[in-house]
Image (spheres, helix red, strand yellow):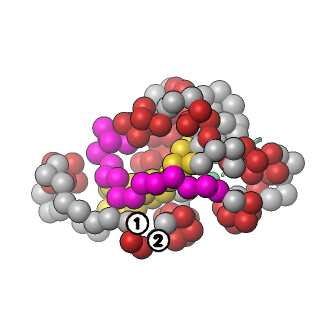
Amino acid sequence: MSDLQKTVVLLKPDALQRDLLGEIINRFERKGLKIVGLKFIRLTDELLDIHYAHLSDKPFFESLKKFMMQTPVVGIVLEGLEAVSEVRKIIGSTNPRQADAGTIRADFSMNVPSNLIHASDSEETAQNEIKRFFSNHEIFSYEKISDRYIFGEGV
Ligand code: DAT
Ligand code: MG
């Protein structure tokens, strides 16, 4: 199906420390998003300079990078219909106190940078982040019996 997209999420150190990995992954599973890549990633200063380049002039840049290196993060590639915008909708706004109730950030967090989760913000970013964090052999294509019920008959 043409509007099947892939997107990247990173479960941040606060999600790991607070035992919220399963809860967060469960929300994506329930939506019908398909997990096509999943692993621990140890972020480095060099990776974060690229990943958060749009924030390099902010006063919180160094502390943000330190926070992201406190523990491994869980990197996930999700696939689904308009997955990039759907996942951004499910995670909620950057500031958890402005995020809509029912979103992951609003329901389980209160502050930045500890807002639990990163997600690609556009199709172009998603493509770059898949290449940044995953090798080709770490992205899997497989059929699930539920695909046709969730994505439609044509899938
Ligand atoms: P998002 O993560 O919603 O894409 P972003 O790309 O603008 O938002 O920022 C990346 C992360 O940086 C964000 O998840 C948390 C952190 N951050 C943003 N604004 C911040 C601030 N004012 N103080 C501390 N951390 C901040
Ligand atoms: Mg962002």
Position in image of residue 138 (x %, y %): 40, 66
Boundaries of the magenta span: 28-43
Q: Is residue 154 left or right of residue 82?
A: left
In the rendered image, residue 37 lying in the magenta stretch gets the answer: yes
Cα gap from disc 1 to disc 2, whole angstroms: 5 Å
| Disc 2 residue type (three-letter) | Ser
Which SS class for mark 1?
helix
Q: Quadrant of residue 140?
A: bottom left
**Whether label 1 touches label 2, CB < 8 Å:** yes
Point 29% across, 45% down: residue: 32
Binning the other alpha carbons within 10 Å of mark 2 as few (below 14), some (14 to 19) or many (20 upward) gives few
Furthest residue in direction bottom, as rendered: 136
Q: Quadrant of residue 53?
A: bottom right
Q: Check residue 90 in the rendering and tell me which mark sits there, or answer none.
A: none
Q: Is residue 21 left or right of residue 116?
A: left
Q: Is residue 99 above or below residue 51?
A: above
| Disc 1 residue type (three-letter) | Glu
Position in image of residue 81 (x %, y %): 32, 56
User: Which residue in the protein does label 2 denote?
Assistant: 135
Q: Is residue 11 above or below residue 23?
A: below
User: Which residue in the protein does label 1 denote?
Assistant: 138
Q: Is residue 30 left or right of residue 110?
A: left
Point 30% across, 38% down: residue: 30
Position in image of residue 121 (x %, y %): 55, 56
Position in image of residue 110 (x %, y %): 65, 27
